[in-house]
Image: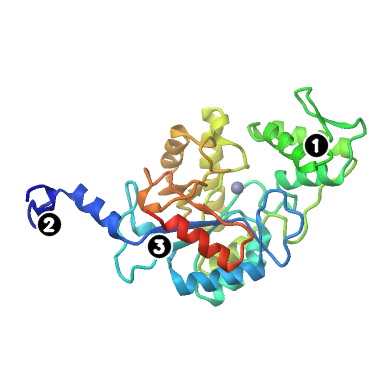
Amino acid sequence: MSGPWNAGPAEQRPSRLRATLRRQFAPPTIVLLYHRVVPEAGRDVNLLATSTANFVAHLDWLAANTRPLRVAEFLGSLGRSGVSQLSFDGGKPRVLITFDDGYADNFHHALPLLAERGLEAIVFPLAEPIGTGQPFWWDALEQVVFDGQPASGGWKLPNGTLVPAHADRSITYRVIHATLKPLPDDARRKALSDLAEQSGLRPQATADSRPMNWRELRGWAAAGLSVGGHAWTHSQLSALSVDEICEEIAGCKRALEQRLGLPVDTFAYPFGGRDDFDALCEDAVRSAGFSCAFANRPGNARWARSRYALPRCLVRNWTGDELAEHMQRWCRP
Ligand SMILES: [Zn+2]
């Protein structure tokens, strides 16, 4: 029988083939994406919150059925296109835990649960909102649309469009969100301020829903957990100019490193979907000095096309059994 399988001892085979075989038969590496961990998930139009009870069930299930990775171990395993160096031992899926946006509840509720189990995680905070005490823009919009009432029967957007106040406010929310998402930050701020004025209310953040402050972020790092970049504001990078993209990406790294006194090596794209970043953004992340970047698309990190487009699996407010079902699906070859 001929072919690459008996072409010679493993060390003489082309390294690309060995890398492929290694990735084919090694256990999957799944990067989990959380946003919030709160005692009780209330109204949550973007489905970002996981209850602490469910989060505990997730951690217990992960401890029993997977091998949670240390951040340095994950980074050390990265090849040019995703995870390639992890050993085969045990056969359990590898899991890395991450949090996007930098909600204060990560520090108050998730950190103690992670620390008591000796688990690591990366938090990707937006740099500009740190310590402002103001709600993230999508949460401010949620309050405006769900708790406010536009005087004229509809919401007037800066481009002149009138969005009807639909009986199902989640529909209204999604229409306005889709309009604000691609705007540069200053234009979005202005639009939100106009909408808040129309609603007659001032959006507020709670102790859990506000962005972390610098003291909390330092506490997160002091506990041995990792901090990465998530851009300066939560803008859709692919919709911005080149200069804006570079400033969003390099600016967040600069601010975090200066204020924390630590290297910030990892990045997560805001929104992180297929249309939210492109090759230009990946180049900007590489040029800014980040060593890898995470998307928000499910998949096995072993099969990433690039270390600057690593898949991540979005976790909802699921029970432990529901997480197990999703893990099975994500781990399928
Ligand atoms: Zn985000």
If you read the primary sequence from the N terminus, does the residue marked by circle 3 or circle 2 appear first?
2
Q: Which disc, if any, is residue 72? A: 3
Q: Position of residue 150 (x, y in %)?
A: 89, 35
Q: SS at mark 1? A: helix
Type of residue at label 2? Glu
Residue 11: mark in rendering: 2
Asked whether mark 2 lies closer than 8 Å to ligand 1, one says no
Query: In the depicted view, which residue is nearer to us: 154 or 327?
Result: 327
Is the residue at mark 1 in contact range of ligand 1, meaning its CB lies under 8 Å from it? no
* Residue at screen point 39% across, 57% down: 75
Q: Residue 145 appears at what percent x and percent y?
A: 81, 42
**Is the residue 279 above or below the residue 315 in the image?**
above
User: Which amino acid type corresponds to the residue marked 3 in the rendered image?
Assistant: Ala
Mark 1 or 2: in front is 2
Residue 328 versus residue 113 in the image, above or below:
above
- Spatial distance from mark 1 to mark 3, Cα to Cα? 42 Å
In three-dimensional space, the C-alpha distance between marks 1 and 2, rounded to whole angstroms, equals: 63 Å
Distance from label 3 to label 2 (Cα)?
27 Å
Do the residues under discs 1 and 3 have CB atoms within 8 angstroms? no
**Residue appearing at x 20%, y 53% in the figure:** 18
Q: Residues within 10 Å of mark 1 (few under 14, many from 20)?
A: some
Identify residue type, mark 1. Answer: Ser
Q: Is residue 315 something that shows in the picture?
A: yes
Q: Nearer the viewer, residue 76 or 43?
A: 43
Would you say 75 lies left or right of 207 here? Answer: left
191 lies left or right of 248: right
Callout 3: few (<14), some (14-19), or many (20+) C-alpha neighbours within 10 Å?
few
Location of mark 1 (residue): 193
Kindly check if marks 1 and 2 are in contact, taking CB atoms under 8 A apart as contact: no
